Amino acid sequence: MVWLLAILAYLLGSLSFAILLSQLSGGPDPRACGSGNPGTTNMLRIAGKRLAALTLLGDLGKGLLPVLIAQHAGLGVQQQAWIGLAAVSGHLYPLYFNFRGGKGVATAAGMLLGLYPPAVLPAVAAWLLVFAFTRTSSLAALAATPLCLPLLAWRQPEALLPMLLLYGVIVWRHRGNLHALFAGRERHF
């Protein structure tokens, strides 16, 4: 059951809402414009607020839905977290789009929302605060993501290992942004 749900979560995660919405709206491919990242921030830059909001909701949903299904199936918290991580992996390396995906922040937030909703609050607050001061989405994401870990470790310790792995993957996917930040070349809003 766990493997089947993990495979289905990966396949769901492989749906790139940024790419699909761009195609449906006749807009540019986010992999070929702006930052080249098929995610919410790039969609905001190249397609506007409406498509960015829809991308965000889709990416959140594909992280949340597999976790909720795993909960409904009676799986434990750690299994739910691994299934959520499979959805994030699909977002990062989508089967349907030549394994060129986004950075996983919104999908990870959806996963976390399913695992332990209160842990999302400090992360969202930190993202908003860092973004308000820096106008840099990548820095906000990198600052906000680890803030959910202590609360999650306290309330859902079984999910900590998959979440630590997830954080490492998110940092890895932002390595280009980190280089640009340190070089003073990161894009701001």
Image: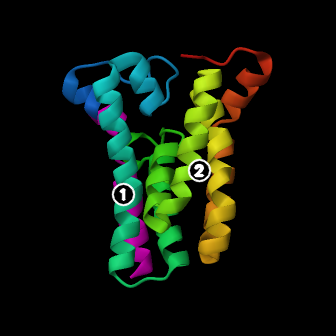
Q: Earlier in the sequence, mark 1 or mark 2?
A: 1
Disc 1 crowd, CA 10 A, few/some/many (<14, 14-19, 20+): some
In the rendered view of the protein, which quadrant contains the N terminus? bottom left
Q: Which mark is residue 63?
A: none
Q: Position of residue 187 (x, y in %)?
A: 60, 17
Q: Main secondary structure of the magenta part?
A: helix
Q: Nearer the viewer, mark 1 or mark 2?
A: 2
Image quadrant where residue 11 sits? bottom left
Q: Position of residue 60 (x, y in %)?
A: 39, 49
Q: Is residue 58 above or below residue 86?
A: above
- Label 2, secondary structure: give it: helix
Task: Identify the residue shown where x is 53% and y is 44%.
Answer: 124
- Label 1, secondary structure: give it: helix
Query: Pointer 1: what residue?
Result: 11
- Direction bottom: furthest residue: 74
Disc 2 crowd, CA 10 A, few/some/many (<14, 14-19, 20+): some
Query: Pointer 2: what residue?
Result: 122
Residues 156 and 46: in front is 156
Q: How did the renderer colour the structure?
A: rainbow
Image quadrant where residue 29 sits? top left
